[in-house]
Amino acid sequence: MKINYPKIKDYEEIDINEAIENEIFTNAKYTGKISSPIVLEDITFDSVIFSHIDFTDIKLFNVEFIDVIFDSVYFSNMEFNNKYFTRVSFNDSKLTNVSFIDSKLKDIEFNNTVAKYLNFSFTKLENLIINKSDIIDTRFLNCEIKNADFDTVNLEKTDFTNCNLKGLDLTKSDISKTLFDEVSLKGIIVDVFACKYLVGLLGVIVKE
């Protein structure tokens, strides 16, 4: 599946502390370590790369991301509810307890990423690629997913209740402990080994 990838060119590599001090939020590659706790609000990061940034000491309020690459970053205990993300890639990153409730995410990519306790409830996701990643204990409740490609994804304890997944190919992903309901099961593509588990979710007993 093709998506629109982040459009970033002619950027300046800069220490993230210096960038924040000088309000440089476009055409930049951020590196370095946060020197002291920072609060950022009411801004848009546009055409930037975050490289090896730990967001533990960065608090974000009303922040949006357009044409952004996160390379080897760490997010923990953050909220991006009712926000807009477009053309954003997460590569070799870690996300824990991050909320995207009721947001709009378009052209989003997760590569070699470990994500736990994410919440995409009531979110609209369009053009989503997840590749060689762990998406564990994550909620996709009542969300809308349009055009998605999951390749080698661990979906342990992830919940897709009332989420339309029609046409999503999960044959290369681990769904042995994934939660589905009648809505989310309709039209998904799985291999024969997953069938016994899935019919069990509907109360069907398979007799061998």
Image (cartoon, rainbow, N blue to C red):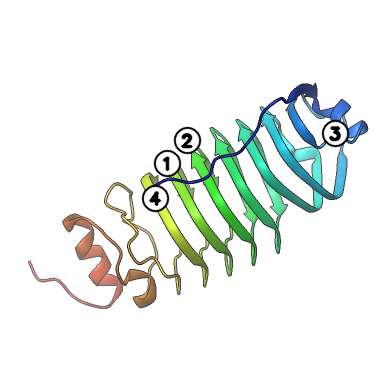
Type of residue at label 4? Asp
Which quadrant of the figure has residue 199?
bottom left
Mark 4 vs 1: CB contact within 8 A = yes
Q: Determine the CA span between mark 2 and mark 3.
A: 28 Å
Secondary element type, mark 3? loop
Q: Determine the CA span between mark 3 and mark 4.
A: 34 Å
Q: Determine the CA span between mark 1 and mark 2.
A: 6 Å
Out of 18 and 68, give the one closest to the viewer.
68
Secondary element type, mark 2? loop
**Residue for badge 3:** 24
Callout 3 crowding tier (Cα within 10 Å): few <14, some 14–19, many ≥20: some
Q: Quadrant of the C terminus?
A: bottom left
Mark 1 vs 2: CB contact within 8 A = yes
Query: Looking at the image, is mark 1 or mark 2 earlier in the sequence?
Result: 2
**Residue for badge 4:** 149
Query: Looking at the image, is mark 4 or mark 1 earlier in the sequence?
Result: 1
Query: Looking at the image, is mark 3 or mark 4 earlier in the sequence?
Result: 3
Q: Is residue 150 left or right of residue 39?
A: left
Type of residue at label 2? Asn
Q: Determine the CA span between mark 2 and mark 4.
A: 14 Å
